[in-house]
Image (spheres, rainbow, N blue to C red):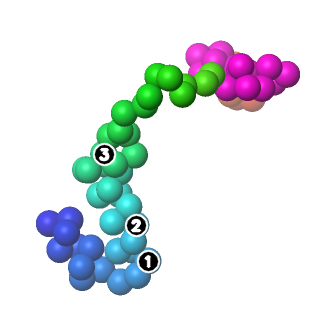
Amino acid sequence: MLATSMQISPFPFNLLLAVARSVYINGEQTNFEIDPAVVVEACDVYPEVNYVTVDDFLTKLVEDMHAAIH
């Protein structure tokens, strides 16, 4: 059904469908192996940057949203 929609849809909608199929159905953005010998953490490459964990970021976001509402 998606392949048919890609064929009959006008540009740029057909491009959007093709990218969505590639990412969500074929898994082409995550379906690869990472060689552990060449993996480098960003904090090792850029030690001067203060990194924030996703958990800390989301906690701060919720706090800010709560403060904005009240």
- Asked if the residue under mark 1 is in contact with the one under mark 3, i.e. CB atoms within 8 Å, the reply is no
Nearer the viewer's eye, disc 3 or disc 1? Answer: 3
Q: Which residues are magenta?
A: 42-59
Q: How many marks?
A: 3
* Left/right of residue 9 with respect to residue 48 in the rendered view: left
For label 1, the residue is: 12
Task: Report the disc number at residue 16.
Answer: 2
- Disc 3 marks a residue whose amino acid type is Gly
- Quadrant (top left/top right/bottom left/bottom right) for the N terminus: bottom left
Question: What is the x, y in percent for residue 28?
Answer: 34, 48
Instruction: Please state which of residues 4 and 62 is positioned toward the viewer in this rendering.
Output: 4
Q: CA distance from mark 3 to mark 1?
A: 21 Å
Q: Which residue is mark 3?
A: 27
Q: Residues within 10 Å of mark 3 (few under 14, many from 20)?
A: few
- Residue 19 placement, left or right of 21: right
Spot the residue most to the right.
48
Mark nearer the viewer, 2 or 3: 3
Q: CA–CA distance between discs 1 and 2? A: 7 Å
Residue 18 image point, x, y percent: 33, 66
